[in-house]
Image (cartoon, helix red, strand yellow):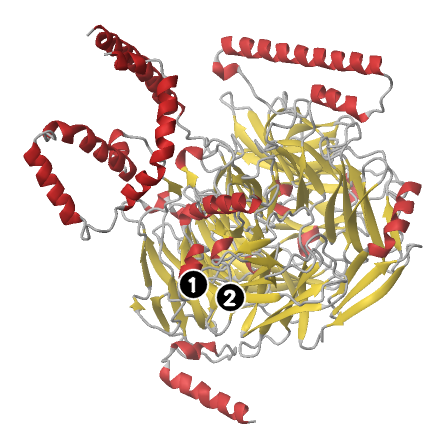
Amino acid sequence: MLHRERIPLLWFFFQAVVVVAWCFTDMETGPGAGVSTQPNGDRFKIEGRAIVPGLKTQDWVSTARILVEGEEYVGFLRTDGSFAVNDVPSGSYVVEIVTPAHRFEPVRVDITSKGKMRARLVNYIKTSEVIRQPYPLQVRANGPHTYFMKRETWGWTDFLMNPMVMMMVLPLLIIVLLPKVVNTNDPEMRKEMEQSMNMLNPNPELPDVSELMTKLFSGSKGSSKAGSSSSKGTRPAVKRR
Amino acid sequence: MARLIWLCLKCIMLYSTVQAVFEDQVGKFDWRQQYVGKVRFSHFDSHVQSSKKVLVATENNVFASLNTRTGELFWRHVDKTGPEGNIDALLQHGQDAVLVVGNGRLLRSWEINIGGLNWEIVLDSGSFQSACLVGQQDTVKHVAVLKKTIISLHYLSNGHQKWIENLPESETVDYQAVYSGGNGEVYALGVVPHSHIAIVAYSLEDGEIIKQISVEAPWLSNIQASCSVIDQGVLTCVDSATVSLYMLDLHLQSQMTQIPLQVLFPFSSPYLPHFLCVNAFFHSRPPLSEFLLQLGPEHHLLLQLNNGHIVTLRDFKPAMLVSFATTGEKTVAAVMSPKNKTACSINLFSGETGRRLLDTTLIFNLDPNGGKPEKLYVQAFLKKDDSVGYRVIVQTEDHTLTFIQQPGRVMWTREEALSDVVTMEMVDLPLTGTQAELEGEFGKKADGLMSMVLKRLSSQLILLQAWIAHLWKLFYDARKPRSQVKNDVTIENLSRDEFNLQKMMVMVTASGKLFGIDSKTGSILWRHYLNNIPSNPAFKLMVQRTTAHFPHPPQCTLLIKDKDTGLATLHVFNPIFGKKSHISPPPLPQPILQSLILPLMDQDYAKVLLLVDDQYKVSAFPSTKNVLQQLQEMASSIFFYLIDSSQGRLSGYRLRTDLSTELIWEVVVPTEVQRIVSVKGKRPNEHVHSQGRVMGDRSVLYKYLNPNLLAVVLESTDLHQERSFVGILLIDGVTGRIIHEAVQRKARGPVHVVHSENWVVYEYWSTKSRRNEFSVIELYEGMELYNSTVFSSLDRPHAPQVLQQSYIFPSSISTMEATLTEKGITSRHLLIGLPSGGILSLPKMFLDPRRPEIVTEQSREENLIPYAPELLIRTEWFINYNQTVSRVRGIYTAPSGLESTCLVVAYGLDIYQTRVYPSKQFDVLKDDYDYMLISSVLLALFFATMISKRLAEVKLLNRAWR
């Protein structure tokens, strides 16, 4: 019982707060619709104009349609790009201009039971939010539809700028070029390098992981090295020297 | 290991969710065909001599302009479906076409060259009767619209109303026609059935009634059907009872003069005409003094009014169809008469004299699988030597339009029946003859080693021969210029391609015409018109035998049910050739309630079709001994359900061994509160590859894969927006157990449902927030599977875990379907037909009730997308790019031989066929695969190794010498 009493209260609250938009739900077909734009009772007309910048209207109007709330009401475009959807009862509708080539933003149009019109931005999440749009509608196409993905084209710059390639090429350059630039046989240089290594390694007592690994596998590595050296016929030639 | 592979695959798929068409793929494997529907009005655009337009207004509420050279559309305007978009009249004047739409609700004027609207106005309420153009001194400036109680006059230039007047005595008089002779008067003609004709003349200027007369006509009941205005305002009517003509000069007379037809044209007494009609139109401008009279089904008279006397110009017998056409000053009558059983001839006769014009014979070949000619539209034109030439459009019963030019050359045909596809199937194409030969070797029973070897050798020889022939053809074609090489698909050279991507689309249309369409090119390979279709039919198409069972031909069965009586017939045919099968289907004397196709096969590999009649008796087709025996064995495990939506009853039955049935469960939905809208099961050819989903913590969440699950959609009968609701019931079809129930409050239909794997996706309209919403239900068994080998509805003690989530969708939808692939490894997409004509491919990933609101490490590991309330429509996801499909009614998906590829056909007013790759093409090389790059890299590497080897050798040699 309590709930039932609360519902109308809530309803009044809504009406008070959420300005006009919510009143349109009253869809009763009363005969006396005072200030209607149309002479015939409770049916109204949604008017507007669609503009595609840089195109003549006759090039695209034949492919366009006005859809009001899906396909509930359908309108067509005049040869000058204006449109009117007739025979729409009061309510709140999303008006879309649909063409295969151009993209138009949908608009929500509210019609009161008295025939007052208002257009606002479509917001499906906050349905009561009102950001006014001009009425009669002025809808401008914001560019063509993008239906297609771009093919990935192969170019040298793409290849070289690839992070993987960069990661491979740069160390390679360092390995190849550094020994040539820096003379490792110079004892001063070696000392300097060791110092810098120590700087990097905060705790000299702690064994380096890589060193540990090399020690661990050194036994097996040695044997494998021996095997491989014997298999390769070129090595003995070196030893002979 | 398998799970690992699966994981890897899944990863690949998840990374490739963005799916779109590339620009160079346009038209590569997709095609669209645009239709307009059954033509109601048609006008050749004749105001320019060289015009190649024909305007058509159809029963599907489409107004279009066709190119007469090619039969393609210049433009097309698709109005609302239903009576509100119904086109009542089409009038053409110059560049403007005036349409009365929605039972006289709207008056529209179209500019026919560019296809834009000139103006549109709302007319006063009242049911529409007639409309005509009103001219004065040879200039047409107005259009008059007659309704039940009012007549109004509008300017042709802007649609503004000039005047509107009430019709006198409209309660008793049934006003049916409006006429204007071009002298400043508009006549409204009404009839009081079996009493008199009421004629009211209005002044064109101000709508004042100039005169009002009533003429005795006790024999007349319908003006539109039996009267016409000819010459300068002479109302002519026929009375079939007394077989006579009545004439009345609207300007002068007030009494009808009777002219017995016997005087004009002596009948032989046994031939009494049972149907008579004046075949001239109210809106033919200017009214001709000639008119046509139909005396019998194939008997017409050409008559002329000459100084108040009627002269018989010509008697056409037999003549199936006659039609008038005017060009310049000349009037001609085109007459179609049967020539022989397969062809008709059309001849042109002069309107003034009734003489046959020379060299105007045109042969129209009747399609043996089509319907009879129904209407004739003639375009006459003056040739350079001032003789009359003509082209015709023949409309047949099966809604086909055929455009014929003079020596009988068919310029184009439009199969408008395809604008109303009801159901379809895709059937694999057969193997080629040689492949079939090889297959046949294994089909037969072994008969000795030697003969087997010989057979093998011979089949290998045949293969070799075919291969050489193929090579020879390639070589031969290569020498010819490219334009001459034709790759026409005909029934003879149909064969399956290596990935089974090309299939036969069997389409059933509402008119009862069946089509076989090649899915690769869209060309119609066969058509078959069933001419005994009831007026309110329901169709169900089933594939009983596929092409896999050579030498048995494939077999499809179409169940045609009369919705009014419930009586059904079966049409059995070969889906590849369209021929009716020699197997005679059983007669079905009882109304059919349910039909189901069983996985059982008879000895000829035809699946068994069970039909349940209203006595709950079951009959099988085919019903051989073998089948009946199998049925007896299997009977205990065959269950089916029946829906009675009028009583809100859903009941499950079991088959007994004597083919009677037993009610085992029943769910009753209170019909005063809610009604059953639809029931969706799962598709029988659907495969689910993975039993579960791997979670972030490496445990597995098993899916609840109940093949017997039904999703029942309920809508409230109360449509008030505060109290309406939409409900979903998930019922096990075998036990009747309600697995889950979901209710969406403040919501209403239309509800679109897709039910697949372990999920149900449905869409509804939220009345509270005025938006479309998607909801997804997923069912899981939990972390452990109860019985992992076999699913049994009877032995599932644990109720599944149910997860549900809802989303906002920023558009209404027309239809919805899920993609389907061979093995079900590929991720699923939802294909959503939008009213704008786009077909959106929405990854199922976005409709996943496990989408988290707060992203955690585990959800990221699982590749779950964080929850967002609104689903986006990205135009890149439109699989049909700018090839919009109007009024999508259904989307059919079929697996191909490639796991990655799903074949899609969207049908509505248009038909669109394409392929989709929900997880991209992971099993074939992409068509942008860079062969050049790969081969050049390989070559470069090869040469690099060669060179470096050489260099190394030189270096070593140098070292050795040192």
Question: Given the image, on which type of amino acid does mark 2 rest?
Answer: Gln
Q: Chain of mark 1?
A: B
> Is residue B253 depicted above or below B125 in this figure?
above
- Residue at image position (39%, 63%) is B855
The chain that hosts pointer 2 is: B
Q: Are marks 1 and 2 in contact (CB under 8 Å)?
A: yes
Q: Earlier in the sequence, mark 1 or mark 2?
A: 2
Q: Taking the image as drawn, is residue B308 in sight?
A: yes
State the image coordinates of residue B8 (x, y, percent, origin top left).
49, 44
- Measured in 3D between alpha carbons, the distance from the residue under mark 1 to the one under mark 2, in whole angstroms, is 9 Å
Question: Which quadrant would the N terminus of chain B be assigned to in this image?
Answer: top right
Q: Residue furthest top?
A: B961
Residue B203 spot, x, y in % from top left: 49, 61
Question: What mark, if any, has residue B867 been given in the picture?
Answer: 1
Q: Which mark is residue B805?
A: 2
Secondary structure, mark 2, is strand
Position of B388 relative to A130 (above/below): above
Viewer-proximal residue among A195 and B529:
A195
User: Residue at image x 48%, y 15%?
Assistant: B482
Percent of width and height locating residue B440: 78, 23
Residue displayed at 56% across by 77% down: B720
Residue extending furthest toward the left: A188
* Label 2: how many Cα within 10 Å (few below 14, some 14–19, many 20+): some
Q: Quadrant of residue A149?
A: top left
Most foreground residue, B213 or B268: B268
* Residue B307 appears in the figure: no
